Image (cartoon, coloured by chain):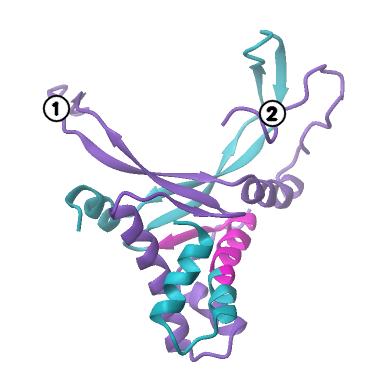
Amino acid sequence: MTDNTVTRAQLGEAVYQEVGLSRNESGDLVEAVLKEISDALVRGEAVKISSFGSFSVRSKGQRIGRNPKTGEEVPILPRKVLVFRASHVLKGAINDALANGGGQAPAAPGSGDSTPPAGPGSRF
Amino acid sequence: MTKSELILRLAEKNPHLYHRDVERIVSAIFDEITRALARGDRVELRGFGAFSVKKRDARVGRNPRTGESVRVARKHVPFFKTGKQLRERLNTGE
């Protein structure tokens, strides 16, 4: 597994390669896409990108937390958190690519155990 | 908002681009993120969030319906951590 980090610059480059726009405008479009998604989430809308995944906003209630250093109890106020759920297409693309280099291949369905491994349609 | 609604919004704000091109641009971005994750790379978009891949070891799970033991193979799962700026915006509403 490599350990590189992809940033806006590479996404801009991918857009630049795809359509005949300047590098500058390609970068602006990457920014515009992220802004549209962020704005929708801030409005409380879920964002669903087919074959990729969905982003949704979940409200968390207040709970009592603890400062791990001092052991002191501190209230954690109600807040909103963003949850990303990857689509099966994205999960599949990652596992197909990483299973080979990652050692043990996924167990073949019907290889002894009567129940197939968790797959599309199961929980999560 | 769906992917096609996202494309529509961007097309409205960029009238100089063909709708078809906006579609290709949006797809190019998500395809690039997918390809990076499939290589095991991290995708870090400051202010928005970071996508990464986490490894889950093989384990013995249980079919919750039958109680039967099931071997779950080792796998990789995509993970997203919300960026600081977006997290703050979600809670202040702007």
Image mark 2: chain: A
Q: Do discs 2 and 1 belong to a common subunit?
A: yes
The image quarter containing residue B13 is bottom left
The residue under the point 62% across, 42% down is: B76
Q: Which chain is purple?
A: A
The residue under the point 46% across, 77% down is: B11
The residue under the point 65% across, 11% down is: B65
Q: The cyan chain is which one?
A: B
Q: Give the amino acid at mark 2.
A: Ala
In the rendered view, does A24 fall on the left or right side of A93? Answer: left
In reply to whether residue B30 is colored magenta, the answer given is: yes
In the rendered view, does B4 fall on the left or right side of A24? Answer: right
Compared to residue A71, the image places residue A41 above or below, namely: below
Q: Give the amino acid at mark 1.
A: Pro
Compared to residue B64, the image places residue B85 above or below, namely: below
Q: Earlier in the sequence, mark 2 or mark 1?
A: 1
In the rendered view, does B91 fall on the left or right side of B5? Answer: left
Structural distance between the alpha carbons of marks 2 and 1: 38 Å
Q: Residues within 10 Å of mark 2 (few under 14, many from 20)?
A: some
Instruction: Quickly name the residue at label 1.
Output: A75
The image quarter containing residue B70 is top right
The residue closer to the viewer here, A24 or A102, is A24
Q: As drawn, which residue projects farthest toward the top?
A: B67
Compared to residue A113, the image places residue A58 above or below, namely: below
- For the record, the magenta segment spans B27-45
In reply to whether residue B38 is colored magenta, the answer given is: yes
Instruction: Quickly name the residue at label 2.
Output: A118
- Tell me where residue A96 appears, x and y as whole percent: 73, 49
The residue closer to the viewer here, A79 or A106, is A79
